[in-house]
Structures are given as structure tokens and as C-alpha cells.
Amino acid sequence: MENTRHRKLLPKNFSKLYSRLLLSYTVVLLIPLVVLIYFYSSRFMKRFYTEIYNTVDSELIQFGTQMDNEWNSMQSITDHLTMTGVTSQAANAAGPLELKPVITALSNYRSANPFLTDIVLVMKDQPYVTTCFTTAEREYYFNQLVTPANTGTSKNVLTDLIDSTRPCCLPSQPLTNRSLNTTTENTLIFSFPVFSDYQKLVGTVMFFVSEHSVQNFKSPRLISYQSQLDRKDQTNSVIMSLGPSPEAIHENKGQYIVRSWHSPENNWSYLAYLPNRQDTFAQVSSITWEFIFSIIIALLLACLVIYTLSRLNYAPIRNLLKKSRQLLPSSSYGPDELDSISYALDYLADQNNELSSKLSGSLNAVRNERLFRLLSGRYDSRQDFNLDCSELDLYLLKGSYCAAIMLLHHTDPNIDRIAKDIQKHSSIPYIYYCIHSLHPEQIIFLVTLTDSQQSPNLCFEDLRMFLAKKYQIASTIGIGTATEQTDCIMQSYMEAASALDYRFVKGNGTVIQFQEITDFSQSSAVYPLEEFTVLKNALFTQNRPAIHTSIQNIILFMEQNPLPLYLARSICFDLVRLVKKQYNTEAFNTSVLELSNMETAQEITDMLKSWSQKLQELPSEKKRSSIAEILAYLDQYVLSPDFSVYEASEHFHMTLPAFSKYFKESTGKNVMDYTIQSRIQKARELLTHTNLPLKDISEQVGYYNVSSFTRRFKLNQGCTPGEYRKSAARSQNSSLS
């Protein structure tokens, strides 16, 4: 039934979502492919062709450099022939027989340079021509032995060579040199003039170079690229062409890629013509086809992967859809799978937020209750408070404390939001906790002070201006005196209330410190110091008649003397504090917050009279429990996370200060130190002899929170629980070995 319902809901939406998955994967695939193809065509191919051109240029330079070297070598031979007197000997020879040493010299130069085919020495006034092999008459040599194909008559050739005053070169052409052999081959003729001591042209040295010798300079790479090489002289005339004829190249100019290099030595230009054909770049063609084939294979594999991944990735969506629709009514289904899942998540989020809100409200209520306890003087020390509130993230740091009360002259329904903003306000860095009072128009501050911080008066003035600017709410703030005793925070609160009452003198919209009204108290009324001294002695000796008399005297003093409200409240506070230290009973647990609401001294004296009457009705104090009973109780409950020293003192019908003092006098130890040491000792045993996780160990030794346990353990032992366990394990292993 469920499968049938699922099939009815999914086909249309499935194909839509699945198509989107396929499309997204395809787009993701195509983007890198397009980029890859672009880079291949625009970057790789360009670089490949550039590499070919650079290679051709490099080989062309090498070719030209070799030709320049041979040119310089021929010039050197000409100069050497002149310097050694060979040319003078040839010019002064009377006949062919005297030219034999000249033939020998020319032959030696030719043997030393295989690049040369023949060396011919022609002197202007000498009818004989001397070569490396023979001597012949000039006319006979150029008309019969050496026959250039494209130079006209031998007379013209002779005139051009003999009369030239600078080195020159005849273009490569078929030449038959019968003095060497009868074979006709393309030959270059280089001529270098010979001058006398007076710089008079006296002859010419001609060098015959076979085109085959020049062809050997052509590198294998140029051959593989099927390149065409031309060499042009200073007149831009082609004197040598290795490959097709220049006419053919000129006629098909668009089919060639031209690369050139200009020689700085002799001002000649070397050109390479690369046929712009696909077979010239066979490697490029091969790489291109390999690339296309790889792209096709990658596309096929990618399509298969896309199809598989799409199905795999859709499977969790299908499962989530099934579960989400089990949470929602059919009317809440979305138009597609993702919308339905989103609706389900929103529903779960709303449920979670509702539960979190309820839990947060409960935690805030517990936090406020513990803070009200602190303001009421229910904690004897900072350690008691921290131990009792360790699971609520409430901590008091070492220092001095004071209380402050802010009276808002406007009842704002968003007082929670105002309190949070006050907590975050950066100009009051030492506001420790901000809580609501029983009055909707009041906010109570618990402040911790350090020497480096500025005056609280200035900071609360800044806070008052902050509220006026942001919320347009006027406020008056009363600040109590600072104290280092936790049980005196209540007194600071009463002083803050008294300072707030002094607004009737200073006016609303001010910040009032309790010290400001001290002078007024001293001048207008006197504190019953003597009566309080008698009361303290009576409480110490448990003399109930004396206690009753002292309280009545204090009441009488308050009735007979017109006291300001702050002083009456201060007297009442001191009386409450003294009685509560001696008698731990609900009859005297009147909230300090209720005292702050009393507007007249008569209300306070009436309350004191009722207290005096209750003191007379109290039964006699029970016999104090033995220290052994207290230790047994502590050993039984100290490892419980719900344990508190305050509850232990109530169990034995003692006030917290009296309980702590009795324990200290009996054992020589502080009760807080004893409880902490007991928990740490148990934790050490569990860490050494068990493999329980830290969470279980922390719960077994009285800590709900692992971080609180770790912090307390490190403070006591100097190392973390994990480090202690490792150290204990190493010690056990070493003892066994």
C-alpha cells in the first residue's frame, strides 16, 4: 500500500528533479571540457607553433653563423696568401713552371678546409690562372675548363671578378669544372680581391664551393620541417637556394611561412620557407587526433558516471522524502521532493525551538532563584555559590562585589530584551549578572570590581544615557558599597535600595552611590551601635531574654528617633543578618526584596516586633550533632551532583556560617575543601582502575558538566584527567615490568 502511494506521488516530480540533477552534472562536465578545448586551441597549439618557429629561427641562426664562419675563413686564406707572398710569387712568375709552389700552397689550404671544392688565384697582369691542381691560361680556363651556365661569356666573368674591389659571390648555378672532373653540379663562386702594398688591386682569389657542402649545414630539424633556405647578399639578390626555385616560392607565396635572420658580419640575409601544409606539422596533427579521441572517451565515461551518480544521489532524497511525508499531513506536501523535505525540516525546527524556549525559560528561572539566594545572604562563601551553581554557568570570580538597582520610569514589556542589551553593553565590562526584581520596573545588577576598572558611578551614568538614547527611557540607579564577603552582598543590595530611595532628595534620572548619603545619616540620626553590641553578646551566649530585650530596645530606638528610610532599612538588615546567623528557621527567612519594598519606618518596626515575638516562641535549640555524624552524611551525599553545603547545614539544623565554623573547629579543614577533596580522590580512583569515559566519571563524582569537572581536577591536581590517567597507566606498567 505504501509503495503504491509512493509511486503515485513521485513519477512527475521524480523526472523533474532527476532531470535537474542530470543537467547540473552535465553542465559541470561541459565547463571544464570547453575550457580545456579553448586552452588547447588557443594556448597549446599557439605554443607548439611558437616552439617550431623558435626552433627554425635557432637553426637558421646556426646555419647563417656557419656560413659566416666559412666566409671569414676564405677571407683569412686570402689575407694569408698575401702575407706569405704567394700572391707576389704568382704575379711575378715567368711561366707555369714557376707557379708550382703556388699550386702546392693552394692545395694545402683546400686540404685543410673540406668545405672548399677548389681555390683559384687570378692575377690581373698574369696570363695564367693557378688552381689547387693545375695552371692554365686565363682564357682557356674560363672558356674550356670552367663553364658557368648563367654568367654569359668568359670575358664578362673574368672582368667581373678581376675588377671587383670588394668580396662578392656569384649565385649558385650549374658549373662544369673540367680541371676536377666532368660532372656538372651547382656551385657557388666566392671572390676576394688581392691588393698590393699601395692598396692597388693586383688580383683575385676565387673559392669554388659545392652546393652539397652548404647542404650539409642544414640541420635535421629543418629537413624534418621540409624548410626552404635562401641566402641573399647586400643587394637583396638570391645567391643560393636550397630547395624549390625562388620563382616557385614567389608564385605560391601564401603556401609558405617565412622566417629570416640578418647577419651582422657580412650584411647577408638568411631566409627559411616552411611549407604551410599539414604534413609539415605531422606531430601537431597526431597530437590533435589523440586529443579528440581522448575527449570522446572522456565524454562517454563521464556520461556513464553522471548517470550512476545521479541515481545514487537521488536515492537519499527519495528516502528523506518518504520519512518527511510521514511527519507531515498530506495537505502539507510541497510541489516537489525538496519542498516537501523543507516543509518537514521547518516543522521539526519549530518543534525544537518550542522545546528550547521552554527549557531556556526553566533554566533562567533556576538561575534567577540562585541569584536571589545570593542577594538574600544564603551563601556563606564564593565557593558555596560556585559549587551550588556549577551546572548553571553561574560563577563568582575572586574580587569585590557590589549590588545596584535600576529604576525604570516606564514599564516596558520588553524588559528581557533591555536586560540582555545592558549585559552586552561594552561600556560596563564588569557587570557580572543582570536579573529582574519582583518589580517590573526594576533591574538588579550584581557587579564585580577590580582595581583596573573605572568608577562604577561613571559606567552606570553611561548606561543610563545608553537606555535614554536607545529606548527613550529615563532611569535612576542606586549603587551599594563594595564588599569582599559573599554573605555581605545582601547588605550592598540594601544599601543600593537605600541609595535609590535618596532619589527623593537628588531627583530622578541620576546615579546615586550609598557613600553620597553617609553624611546625611551621620547628621540626621545615630546608629544604635551599643544596642547591637549587646544583641551580639546575647546571641553568642544564647540568652533569649537578653536577646528579646535587645531587640525591643532597638525597636524603641527606632520609634523614638525619626530615622530616614535608608537607616531604618540598614538597622533592620543588620538585625536580620544577626538573627539568621543564630537561628536557621523559616520564620526569619523574610526576603530582602520584601524589605526593599517597605516605604516607611513604621512598616519596618512592625516587622521587627513580630520577629521578637517569634523568638520567644521558638523551641530550645537541639543538641548539636557530632562531627562523626556530619562526616558520615558528607561521605554519603558528597558525590551526588545535587549535593550542596547549604542543604547539609539545614539537615543538621544549623546556619551555613555556624556549620562551616563548627566543621573547621572540629576537623581543622574547610568544609568546601573537604567536599572537593573527596570528589577528586574518588575521581583519581576511577581514572586509575577503570576505563570509564570522562562523562561517566564526572557524573559519579558529582559534576553534571565534563568541563566543570576537568577545570576543578586540573586546579586541584595540576593536570587534566586524561593526563592523570596516562601517567597512572605508565606507573602501573613500569611497576609490572
Image (cartoon, grey):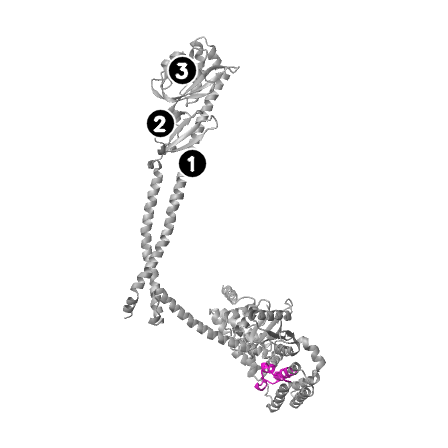
* Part of the protein shown in magenta: 571-600
Question: Going 35% across and 27% down the picture, which residue do you hit?
Answer: 247
- Left or right: residue 342 compared with residue 600: left
Number of other residues with Cα within 10 Å of mark 2, as a class: few under 14, some 14 to 19, many 20 or more: few
At mark 1, the secondary structure is: helix
Answer above or below: position of 583 versus 68: below
Q: Which mark is residue 316?
A: none
| Location of residue 133 by image quarter | top left
Answer above or below: position of 82 versus 302: above
| Location of residue 188 by image quarter | top left
In the picture, the quarter occupied by the N terminus is: bottom left
Across and down, in percent, residue 565 comes to: 65, 82
Q: Which mark is residue 247?
A: 2
Give how far apart the Cα atoms at labels 1 and 2 are.
26 Å
Across and down, in percent, residue 663 comes to: 60, 79
Number of other residues with Cα within 10 Å of mark 3, as a class: few under 14, some 14 to 19, many 20 or more: few
* Camera-nearest residue between 5 and 237: 237
Q: Amino acid at mark 2?
A: Glu
Residue under circle 1? Answer: 54
Residue under circle 3? Answer: 156
At mark 2, the secondary structure is: helix
Residue 639 seen anywhere in this rendered image of the structure: no
Q: Nearer the viewer, mark 1 or mark 2?
A: 2
Dot 1 or dot 3: first in sequence order is 1
Q: Amino acid at mark 1?
A: Asn
Dominant secondary structure (helix, strand or loop) of the stretch shown in magenta: helix
